[in-house]
Image (tube, coloured by chain):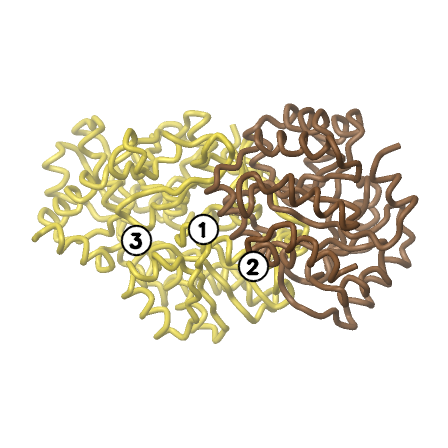
Amino acid sequence: MKRTEELFRTKKNILNIYVTAGFPKLNDTVPIVQELVKNGVSMIEIGMPFSDPLADGPTIQHSSEVAIENGITLALIFKQIEEIRKTVTIPILMMGYYNQILQYGDKAFFEKAKAVGVDGFIIPDLPLAIYQEKYKQILQHLDLDFIFLITPQTTDDRIRLIDNESSGFLYIVSSFAITGSKSDIQQNQLDYFEHINKLNLKNPKLIGFGISNKKTFDTACKHAEGAIIGSAFIKALSKNNDLEGSVKAFVQSVI
Amino acid sequence: MNYKGNEQGFYGEFGGAFIPEMLYHNTNELKENYLQIINSKVFKKEFKDLLKEYVGRPTPLYYAKRLSKKYNTNIFLKREDLNHTGAHKINNTIGQILVAKQMGKQRIIAETGAGQHGVATATVCALMGLECIVYMGEVDIKRQAPNVARMKMLGAEVRPAISGSKTLKDATNEAIRDWIANPVDTYYLIGSVVGPHPYPDMVARFQSIISKEMLSQLQEKTGRDYPDKIIACVGGGSNAAGAFYHYLDNTKVELIAVEADGLGVATGKTAATTQVGSEGIIHGSKTLLMQNSEGQITEPYSISAGLDYPGVGPLHAHLFKTGRGKFIGATDKEALDAAFELTLLEGIIPALESAHALAVLKKITCKPDENIVVNLSGRGDKDMETYINRMD
């Protein structure tokens, strides 16, 4: 059974944490992930730093710039994930942009990711139609998840289409926003989450964008199987030099 | 061969809409509506009237006698520099503002590099009474102060892009993010033939007025509705797209696209995308772009802020790959020389961008009986500081 499938079958209130690879220091990724897992995080999203991350806000873009400056490469990210996989058994996803995958070589990228123990991908600018035409078969063959986003503007028909093509889970974008914006969840967002629940989709759902603390995480968990935190965690990492202490304090403040 | 793109916005293998789901609704709404709007009688009339009465079209196709004599050929300048606001950019902003209005949008956002597109956008927003926010790289705000002042005087808010390299590509990222955060009331008015479908097609259609006028002007002046060569500079590529548009399928016309070599292609300080770039995705479009082996988009360099973009529109990537377009570079120095040459021979101070197009007259062979059109995309007022420094 896939690691994601196993996770959603056995666990509720799933906390997925986004980690920019190579940030704050080039080789911090492995200890950060190990510490996250030790403190009860259920899923990890490894961010592949990109120069022009359209769907991300200033916090993640800044962390990406620092990581690129530090010398992060896809080859190094694969090595770090390989290292992480020696001790970590929870699902690991890679999040990045399509151009990076094209330059690495798309087929080689997915095969290498599979080989180092990656479970799935979030590639926001890889459109559904291109996925269906070029990648669906490869990913199914490699037994890897491809996670699509849905937003408050996605129509019901399109949500069903996306649900049908997704595996792993659906990434519910909580509002009209890029990552790292807003601080509280509003009533219209709750209505939107409930509307999605009424569609009886086949995939579990994690809510992301605007989830930053215990309050927003708990609210998200009431309306979905869990949530994704990115910018708030990256901010917490930036605050001081005690890496393990910051990771521990952050996770404990949320769950 | 089809050079004008298909319904999904693909020019051969280039183009398309590589965008996050957060932008799907916005671009789809535009895609579903733009052709119907711009083909409607009401739009056509309003667009035509505004171009005539407000922009000052048609722009002359001027026979440059002394320049022609120097190069022993017949050189015509398509005088886009005589448009209101001083460049071809306004052809597109007039078109798009009418589309935005038709779609009921209240708030207009745009990106700008040198500030020409920002000024053209602020201008049409003032004309229509719409809110206008222009994203501009912090670095560009400092080096293009007069255009920043013009935008402000026109009532626009200029927001600095402080991420990345703080130039045009980052201003574009910021504008796209604004659109993601404000999908209902906001219209994103892109300034070139770049971005996700349908922008490259829509912008090319609005700029195609340039070559449409050339058809009848050339007929009148030369007895033939096509020239032997058309020369235009390419940053993103909107003025070239407009100058080439009605001749794309006429293979008797040689299409010459001029990129900014900067300090020289070999130095790495360049914006010559087709020379140093490779295939990839930038701002939602599959095209040629400047990047490293990791797919990180690299920073271009040119003396001309309007050519300082690390990609070219998908139409141009297709023209390059198929060989339909001939791509030539001009360095900073060659462009400056050409600007002074035109000024002294014809009494026209060109924009630095257009000076790149003029610079290739030295690099190509023209026969005495040939007719060459150089698209003079803009005037040089905004570049006076650079020109003054050169005179010192």
Identify the residue position indicated by label 2 in the image.
Answer: A239
Question: Marks 2 and 1, how far apart in space?
Answer: 21 Å
Residue drawn at 20 percent across, 34 percent down: B361
Identify which residue, B162 or B183, lies in the foreground. B162
Neighbor class of circle 3 (other Cα within 10 Å; few <14, some 14-19, many 20+) is: many
Residue B33 in sight here: no
Q: Chain of mark 1?
A: B
Identify which residue, A106 or A227, lies in the foreground. A227
Identify the residue position indicated by label 3 in the image.
Answer: B80
Q: Amino acid at mark 2?
A: Lys
Element under label 2? helix
- In the image, the chain rendered in brown is A
Residue drawn at 48 percent across, 48 percent down: B205
Q: Colour of chain B?
A: yellow
Q: Chain of mark 2?
A: A
The disc at residue A113 is none
Q: Amino acid at mark 3?
A: Glu
Q: Is residue A84 left or right of residue B253?
A: right
Identify which residue, B305 or B244, lies in the foreground. B305
Nearer to us of marks 1 and 3 is 1
Residue B178, given in percent of the width and then of the height, sits at: 56, 61
Residue A244, given in percent of the width and then of the height, sits at: 65, 50
Label 1 near label 2: C-beta < 8 Å?
Answer: no
Question: Marks 2 and 3, how far apart in space?
Answer: 53 Å
Q: Amino acid at mark 1?
A: Gly
Residue B200, given in percent of the width and then of the height, sits at: 50, 46
Q: Is residue B310 above or below residue B102?
A: above
Q: Is residue A215 left or right of residue B183?
A: right
Identify the residue position indicated by label 1 in the image.
Answer: B164
Q: Is residue B227 above or below residue B52?
A: above
Identify which residue, A97 or A63, lies in the foreground. A63
